[in-house]
Amino acid sequence: MGSHSVEFSVLVLFLVSFLLGSTSAEKLCSDNDGDNGCFRSRVLAAQRADRVKELPGQPPVKFRQYAGYVTVNETHGRALFYWFFEATQNPSKKPVLLWLNGGPGCSSIGFGAAEELGPFFPQNSSQPKLKLNPYSWNKAANLLFLESPVGVGFSYTNTSRDIKQLGDTVTARDSYNFLVNWFKRFPQYKSHDFYIAGESYAGHYVPQLSELIYKENKIASKKDFINLKGLMIGNALLDDETDQKGMIEYAWDHAVISDALYEKVNKNCDFKQKLVTKECNDALDEYFDVYKILDMYSLYAPKCVPTSTNSSTSHSVAGNRPLPAFRSVLRPRLISHNEGWRRMAAGYDPCASEYTEKYMNRKDVQEALHANVTNISYPWTHCSDTVSFWSDAPASMLPTLRTLVSAGLRVWVFSGDTDGRIPVTATRYSLKKLGLKIVQDWTPWYTKLQVGGWTVEYDGLMFVTVRGAGHQVPTFKPREALQLIHHFLGNKKLPTFPF
């Protein structure tokens, strides 16, 4: 018997054992089924269709992976693309963790899966080549990545006007519908503890989706209930006023801008206001000029220098193209119109995003991932050029965080301390504004013999800094990031002494 047959037989036995504990309506063939099939047969067929057997250039692994589309709105033909990796060991006993990147309009597969915390990283090679990430987060959980909203990555809609109606609210609702339907496709994971994590603009996505799940769970039927236990966000956009104040202060304190420019910004910009004066715009333009020569997302990392071997067809990540005009009406209003809003740090290899774009645009890769089934008219990019409007974005996520803390959900906030875009200074201001009682103040935590960062334990929230990490913490400090997610999922404090 071939290896694929053995693996599928194991999957069948696993699902049968799960389904024997399901309701009789699910166990038996139902007259209400559109195809008059059995629940088990439909589940097995759907999972088998999404199974990724092997990717071009992939090293051998023992864990299973799945990828494909889940419809979130049948009327409009909206479908979101996902990539799921089972845990490396004991997946039946591990929680499910959803990871979201931000933007808005950026891919969680391009950044999170392929360059931060997934098991496979594309390499610079004439032939497709993936490197196995020894610090992949599927060592701690069953790991799910989602490209959301539609228009991002491989996710699509058959109703063109949907792209002009995107915003935080639509993104949260579609992501919720995705999860409800995804758990129907993978019912063996429905009873598992479920967590959501993300970074950057996912400081909006993660709390908003968590709050929606929390509210829907109060009225949801058993089949739609999601076993949400907690959320974790890193270098997260939380509050317009404090994020912008902290960004400017961090740049001055880290010798990025002059005293004169620091004073000019503070004199002309009121970060509490929605609208911005011309004088403030001019000062901020001067501020952002310095990040044309430095990596704003990792202050001490090198920038990618394009060459004939690493330059891809798209420069949406490493290039210097201006941002779409809609960023000027998207919060935070004072800085969103400036170049570099969506460009992300690429880590130890500053050109890693170039390799990812080249890999994800290969036809054989897309076929292996069951992606781009509608033959979208544009290339896959880290951050979408299609998403050109954003209808709603609250000025502050702090009220939502208060709701989630009050609901008893586990809430962790982490911050890489070399990020200049949403720096640790901004996050500290935001958490102070949140107003929670401090249980244990500034305390070092350790990775073996070295200080990994500091923690502040609040009443209902844990704040963790990661020393030497940029905006994408798992890229720059992979060992510490894996330690962080292990402790978050285990509801354990990070070690306060060397070990």
Image: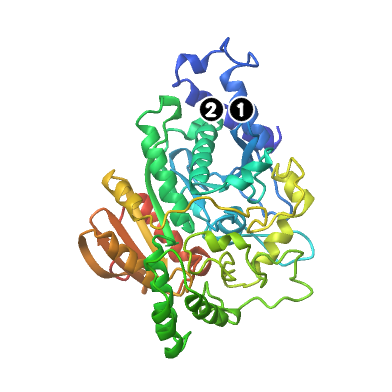
Classify mark 1: helix, strand or loop. helix
Position of residue 336 relative to residue 412, above or below, is below
Name the residue nearer the viewer: 141 or 342. 342
Q: Amino acid at mark 1?
A: Leu
Q: The C terminus is located in which quarter?
A: bottom left
Name which residue lies at 21% across and 62% down.
Answer: 438
Q: The N terminus is located in which quarter?
A: top right
Relative to 204, is 377 on the left or the right? right
Q: Amino acid at mark 2?
A: Leu
Position of residue 164 relative to residue 430, above or below, is above
- Horizontal and vertical percent position of residue 127: 78, 61
Q: Which residue, given by chain and number where applicable, does mark 2 sit on?
A: 15
Name which residue lies at 49% across and 39% down.
Answer: 176
Name the residue nearer the viewer: 371 or 433. 433
- Horizontal and vertical percent position of residue 319: 67, 71
State the scheme by which the image is colored: rainbow
Name which residue lies at 39% across and 83% down.
Answer: 253
Considering every residue shown, the one lying at the far top of the view is 31
Q: Nearer the viewer, mark 1 or mark 2?
A: 1
